[in-house]
Amino acid sequence: QVQLVESGGGLVQAGGSLRLSCAASGGTFSRYVMNWFRQAPGKEREFVARISTSGYSTSYVDSVKGRFTISRDNAKNTVYLQMNSLKPDDTAVYYCAAARDWSPRSGYDYWGQGTQVTVSS
C-alpha cells in the first residue's frame, strides 16, 4: 500500500510560480509512473503531467506545456511539479497519482488527498 501526500499549494498572483511536491511512503516508489491531475470547481478531473519510472520520459497536457515541469527524485520518494507563469485557469486542487503502467488505460493505483492552488488575476 502506497501513501501519497501532496504539499506546496497556495495562493499566488498570475505570472507567479509554485512548486508542488508529492511524497510517497509504504511502497517501492521507483516502480510507479507518477502523474499529476487537477480538478477545478465544477469541472472534471484533468490530467496534467506524467513521468516515467526513471524520469527519462514525460508527458503534459497541451495547456501547461512550456510552463510546467514534472520531475522525480527516486532517492527521496518524491515527485515534483514546477509551475511557472501561472494563470487563473490553473486554479484547482492538484492531485498526484501512482500507476503501474505508462498507458492511462491501465488506471491508477494510488491517489493523494490533493493540494489547493489558487491563482489570482
Image (spheres, rainbow, N blue to C red):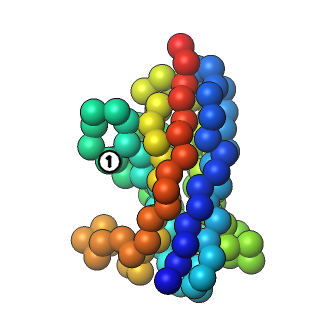
Identify which residue is drawn at 60% across, 82% down. Answer: 26
Q: Residue furthest top?
A: 121
User: 10 Å neighbourhood of mark 1: few (<14), some, or many (≥20)?
Assistant: some
**Front position in the image: 68 or 57:** 68
Identify which residue is drawn at 54% across, 46% down. Answer: 115
Residue 93 percent coordinates (x, y): 46, 42
* Number of numbered callouts drawn: 1
Residue 117's place in the image compared with 27, above or below, is above
Residue 87 percent coordinates (x, y): 51, 25
Residue 58 percent coordinates (x, y): 50, 61
Residue 91 can be seen in this image: yes
Identify which residue is drawn at 34% across, 33% down. Answer: 41
Residue 105 percent coordinates (x, y): 25, 71
For disc 1, the marked residue is 45
Q: Quadrant of residue 21?
A: bottom right
Identify which residue is drawn at 59% across, 55% down. Answer: 6
Residue 40's place in the image compared with 32, above or below, is above
Residue 56 can be seen in this image: no
Callout 1 secondary element: loop
Q: Amino acid at mark 1?
A: Arg
Q: Quadrant of residue 9?
A: top right
Horizontal side of 48 relative to 68 (left or right) equals left
Residue 60's place in the image compared with 10, above or below, is below
Horizontal side of 58 relative to 26 (left or right) equals left
**Front position in the image: 56 or 76:** 76
**Front position in the image: 64 or 94:** 94
